[in-house]
Image (tube, rainbow, N blue to C red):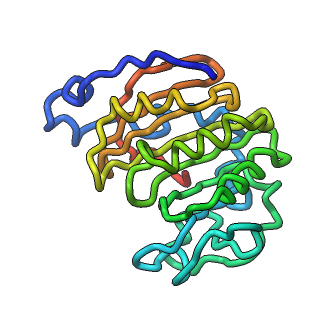
């Protein structure tokens, strides 16, 4: 386990005057190091998006959908989250996982099965030399949560294929989680499993903080960088 000291500061210190928050100039592409992963990740044939349970409005998954407990034969999925608005999900077995470089895995906290982690593990060990897991909450915050704790416990004991980049998006829009508490939880991750780790604390559609934790160049490690999450974020 690799432990990292993270310098945390208050939101006021991050953003300054509250009126300045609305005018952040940095965008996602300015702060992320996910470009270290094969750039074919932006091609739809190399992308995959799943939500692990039915959603209240049934805009994403079918009514009564649950992530399978024992296999991957009836998964509800999209190639990209942009498809949600104009088509229904595909439901079936994913036989192209070796083609996937970018996995957008959305957590509902309703899927009480380790099979979700087994699916992610299968992705981590696919044929791609580098790959990116975009791990994000769909409603309640991902950190802190039992789901995140279980994610760490499951993968900390696993030896996964080299080349995996972990990008955590913690959307705090519905519940104002303290960023310091969230950062403290990140030491639960086994850093040696990943070529890169990045934490994004999303306050709302225009205000977020990126904290790079590991990347090839060891740049901006532990630094809190405020940015606009919807700026310069095409097809991500």
Which residue is at 14% across, 30% downward?
17
Residue at the far bottom in the pictured view: 63
* Lateral position of residue 218 relative to residue 211, left or right: right
The image position of residue 15, as x and y in percent, is: 23, 30
The image position of residue 10, as x and y in percent, is: 24, 26
In terms of image quadrants, where is residue 16?
A: top left
Compared with 20, 145 (above or below) is: below
Q: 158 or 103, which is in the foreground?
A: 158
Which residue is at 55% across, 51% downward?
236
Q: 27 or 182, which is in the foreground?
A: 182
Compared with 135, 62 (above or below) is: below
The image position of residue 77, as x and y in percent, is: 64, 70
* Lateral position of residue 203 relative to residue 64, left or right: left
Q: How many marks?
A: 0
Compared with 46, 151 (above or below) is: above
* Lateral position of residue 216 relative to residue 54, left or right: right
* Lateral position of residue 43 relative to residue 221, left or right: right
Compared with 85, 210 (above or below) is: above
Which residue is at 59% across, 45% downward?
151
The image position of residue 162, as x and y in percent, is: 78, 33
Q: 70 or 119, which is in the foreground?
A: 70
Which residue is at 53% across, 33% downward?
198
**Rendered-image quadrant of the N terminus:** top right
């Amino acid at each position: 386990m690799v432990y990292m000291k993270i310098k945390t500061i208050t939101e006021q210190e991050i953003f300054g005057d509250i009126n300045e928050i609305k005018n952040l100039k940095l965008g996602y592409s300015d702060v992320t190091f996910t470009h270290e992963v094969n750039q074919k990740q932006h091609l739809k044939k190399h992308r995959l998006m799943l939500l692990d349970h039915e959603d209240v409005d049934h805009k994403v998954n079918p009514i009564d959908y649950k992530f399978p407990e024992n296999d991957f034969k009836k998964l509800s999925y999209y190639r990209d989250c942009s498809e949600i608005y104009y088509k229904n999900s595909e439901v079936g077995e994913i036989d192209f996982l070796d083609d996937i470089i970018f996995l957008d895995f959305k957590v509902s906290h309703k899927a009480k099965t380790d099979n979700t982690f087994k699916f992610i593990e299968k992705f981590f060990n696919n044929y791609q030399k580098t790959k990116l897991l975009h791990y994000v909450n769909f409603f309640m915050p991902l950190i802190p949560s039992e789901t995140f704790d279980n994610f760490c416990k499951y993968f900390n004991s696993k030896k996964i294929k080299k080349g995996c980049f972990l990008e955590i998006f913690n959307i705090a829009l519905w519940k104002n989680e303290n960023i310091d508490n969230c950062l403290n939880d990140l030491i639960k991750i086994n850093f040696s499993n990943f070529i890169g780790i990045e934490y994004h604390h999303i306050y709302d559609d225009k205000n977020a903080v990126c904290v790079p934790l590991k990347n090839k160049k060891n740049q901006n490690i532990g630094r809190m960088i405020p940015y606009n999450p919807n700026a310069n974020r095409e097809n991500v």
